[in-house]
Image: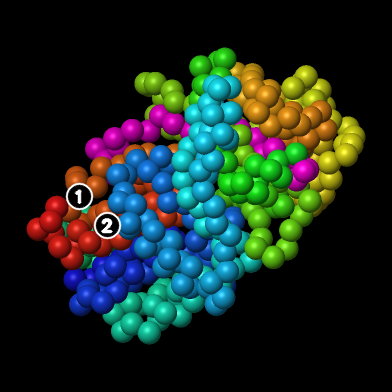
Amino acid sequence: MKIGVIGFGAAAIGFIERIKDSDHEIHILEKSKDIYSSSISGIRADGKLFVSNQMGGELDLDLDLQKRLVEFYIDQTSERSYESGSSFGDKEYYKNFYREGFQPILSDFYHLGTDQLKEVLFNLYQKYLKYKNIHFHFEHRISNVEIRNDQVILNNSETYDMVIVAVGRSGHDLIRSILARFPELILDNTKVDLGIRLELPNHIVEDLNREMYEFKVKYKSVTGYMVRTFCNNPSGYVVTEKYDDFVTVNGHSKLRQKSGNTNVAVLTTIQLTQPFNDPISYGTYIAKLTNILAGQDKVILQTYANFKNSKRTKNLYRVEPTLASENYITGDINLAYPRRIVSSIIDFIENLNKVIPGIANDDNLVYAPEVKFYSNRLCNQKLAKLKFAGDCSGNTRSIIYATAHGWITAEKILNPQDE
């Protein structure tokens, strides 16, 4: 069978790894110009791999499979160097957060570091090049998908027996065009995460970072919205992330090079009801509005006190930004964000300060926009020849879950009787 895989990210890697030794002919269709300009979606930003049944997606994944996939990624590094830990393995930490109304999230983590990620991707590419049944096609953007005569037609000319769409969340334009043709695939499309990136000195959270490196908690705010931490980066760096027509803020950390700050996302989950059906456009609109205020390809930076009091930031104090100055302006995030979102974030941080004194210091830094898109949750049973794997399916939100989803998708092709 001739199979097309759109994208070369975590889900595609999981799919290829499982199916590579079969007789199927695999074609990877990647929009990047070459392997050096490609990236594994979320893994490009930090390289944290989690093993958990409390986070990462909507799938019920076997923990042993998750652990095997973590080991698989570690094997792609030259030195097998990584940081690891267990989130809330210490019961006292768990009790302290729980007492103040937080829901601690349990997980094991393995941090490869941004500085090893290009190596991981390149090594995988070199590995798959050795297989005669695997073919890479770079600068190959797919804009149209059709199904005719029990085959999948890409860009009105390329014919495949089956196609796996593994474009991550950045491929929302392609997903939107597919859903316009097959709207029956949508199971749920009402959720988006909107928030900020908080940056503070390491010493405020050094005990917590030392204990678990990545702490993940949820909290039901006074507004009724659920707020959570995401992507904690000890001694890390704030960076911008470029989409097709807007810029957001993100964070990462390196295995060897360290900063004096920790950054973490604080995200408010917005789940709206009918007739709302386009969370990606909603999140994109907020991001673009923030970019308009900040200027071309820039984000807004504000002190926490000014963010809390709706005042424009003009001067910083003790905390030095790790984001390069050409990528931000000091301003007022409140001009772009709905007040209910801001109120939810402030309530979260003020209560978190009871457990982590200093996290609500006036001169800590707040960046926006930070947006995490939940792709439409799609049904993979509707179309026999067209499948969705990883974050673009709406079923995963982490590297390991996306990789596992690709693996499971390949498993079902290899062993259809097990479905």
Q: Residue furthest top?
A: 222
Residue 146 falls left or right of residue 369: left
In magenta stretch: residue 64: no
In magenta stretch: residue 197: yes
Residue bearing the label numbered 1? 383
The answer to whether residue 294 is seen in the rendering is no
* Kind of residue at disc 1: Leu
Q: Which label belongs to residue 333?
A: none
Q: Residues within 10 Å of mark 1 (few under 14, many from 20)?
A: few
Q: Is residue 288 above or below residue 83?
A: above
Count the marks: 2
Specify how the rendered protein is coloured. rainbow
Q: Nearer the viewer, mark 2 or mark 1?
A: 2
Residue 238 falls left or right of residue 413: right
Residue 205 falls left or right of residue 407: right
Question: Where is residue 78 shown, x and y percent of the image?
Answer: 55, 77
Q: Earlier in the sequence, mark 2 or mark 1?
A: 1
For image coordinates 58% across by 35% down, the residue present is 93
Q: Is residue 84 above or below residue 221?
A: below
For image coordinates 37% across by 39% down, the residue present is 376
Residue bearing the label numbered 2? 408
**Of the pair 85 and 287, the residue shown nearer to us:** 85
For image coordinates 37% across by 21% down, the residue present is 274
Question: Where is residue 11 shown, x and y percent of the image?
Answer: 38, 58
The answer to which image quadrant residue 196 occupies is top right
**Of the pair 410 and 74, the residue shown nearer to us:** 74
* Bounds of the magenta segment: 177-203
**Element on which disc 2 rests:** helix
Question: Where is residue 205 shown, x and y percent of the image?
Answer: 70, 41
* Kind of residue at disc 2: Ile
**Element on which disc 1 rests:** loop
